[in-house]
Amino acid sequence: MIRINLLPEAKRKAPKAKGKKPIRPPREIPFVWIIAGLIVVLITAAGLAMWHMGLVREQEDLQKQTTAIEGQISQMKVQQGLVQKAREQRNNLAQKLEIINTLKKRQTGPVNLMAQLAGAMPRRLWLSAMTQNSSAITLSGFAVDHRQIAEFMENLQKSPLFHGVELINIQTQQSGGGGQQGAPPVPLRQFEITCQLTQ
């Protein structure tokens, strides 16, 4: 089949090849866009640099805080050791004080007993012997008269250290005249009293 092109020569176009697109000349990018792109890149780079510097500073701060905390932990360990040592010393001191108090109680028992006896004795009465068997005490001595012995027994009964005061024996004895030559003998009452110690 024959084709005839009836268009004038000026308007005729060469037949287009199938499957090929015409080649267009490259477009030129405006100079303003290039500058804007560079500015965006520079701003982004500056932002990233500042962010990185912030991270570095934060890391340095964290390292400083970690070092400070480790120092505090070391100090606390030292203080904990001192506290533990102080507790041990306090416990040892408490044990020693308890032993001292126990010894004082044991020591003050006889002293208190003698003080109570001395306070209960009238002026004209004296003791010659004292024996103790467990909580029972036997007192032997001399007095000028019966009144002195009765007063001594009353004083013992009033004392919180003694109870159950009983007169076991009383005898009259003649003694010298008070150490003076030629003085008449003075009658003395020898007595024996028992009582119980209050626990």
Image: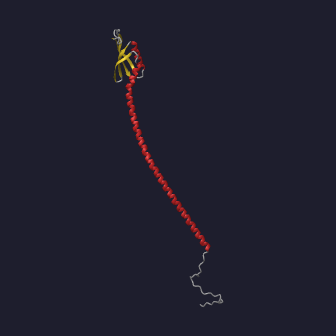
**Vertical position of residue 180 compared to residue 116: above or below:** above
Look at the image and tell me whether residue 105 can be seen: yes
Q: Quadrant of residue 165?
A: top left
The location of residue 86, given as percent across then percent down, is 42, 41
User: What is the residue that sits farthest to the front in this orientation?
Assistant: 181
**Vertical position of residue 114 compared to residue 175: above or below:** below
Q: Residue at x 37, y 28 (%)?
A: 107
Q: Residue at x 43, y 44 (%)?
A: 82
Q: Quadrant of the C terminus?
A: top left
The location of residue 150, given as percent across then percent down, is 40, 14
Coloring scheme used: secondary structure
**Vertical position of residue 178 compared to residue 84: above or below:** above
**Vertical position of residue 67 compared to residue 176: above or below:** below
Give whichever of 122, 30 is nearer the camera. 122
The location of residue 73, given as percent across then percent down, is 45, 50
Give whichever of 126, 70 is nearer the camera. 126
The location of residue 183, given as percent across then percent down, is 35, 9
Q: Quadrant of the N terminus?
A: bottom right
Give whichever of 158, 143 is nearer the camera. 143
